Amino acid sequence: GGDVPGRGPACGERHGVPAGCQDIRPTRPHPLPSLPAAGELALYRVAEQGLANVALHAEATACSLELNLTDSAVLSIVDDGRGLPTDHRCGVGLRSMRERVEELGGCLSIGPDGAHGTRLEASIPLQSHG
């Protein structure tokens, strides 16, 4: 059928997503190309922490997760929440995400997405690193 595995209230409840933010729409290339194991793990952990941050801090009603692959793997998480506070400081989660991505020669950015909400983007080059 047209069901997307891992979507809906059961998934949201398992991962602590507030009732109003259960519309997580993953977008990915099809077929999904093979990634180096370290890149897969880094992107998985960034997605996990990024979605946890949306659930804990954003007061969002919706968020999207998108993975684009060209010469880099680019993971984007965008929410329609309250945005970053003016006195925003990187916590352990953001530092951990940044370190994972930078270890693979990539970069992580976080900032506003339009008038409301936040965009987190992690980019990892797909060429071999050692």
Image (cartoon, rainbow, N blue to C red):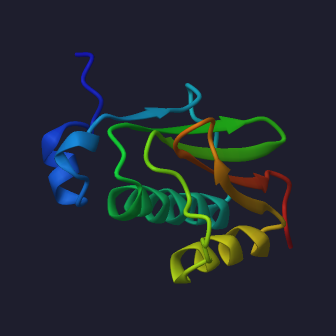
Residue 33 at x, y percent in the picture: 64, 38
Q: Quadrant of the N terminus?
A: top left
* Image position of 65 (left or right of 130): left
Residue occupying the far front of the picture: 86
Q: x and y percent of residue 49 in the render? A: 46, 65
Residue at 41 percent across and 55 percent down: it is 58
State left or right for residue 108 relative to residue 16. right
Q: Is residue 2 above or below residue 109?
A: above
Q: Residue at x 34, y 52 (%)?
A: 59
Q: Percent x, y for residue 78?
A: 53, 42
Compared across the picture, whether 98 is left or right of 50 comes to right
- Taking the spot 71% from the left edge, 67% from the top edge, the residue there is 101
Q: Please name the residue shown 22% across and 41% down the image.
A: 20
Q: Quadrant of residue 32?
A: top right
| Residue 20 seen from this side | yes
Where is 36 relative to 23, above or below?
Answer: below
x%, y% of residue 34? 64, 45
Rendering quarter of residue 24: top left
Height in image: 113 above or below 28?
Answer: below
Foreground residue among 24 and 55: 55
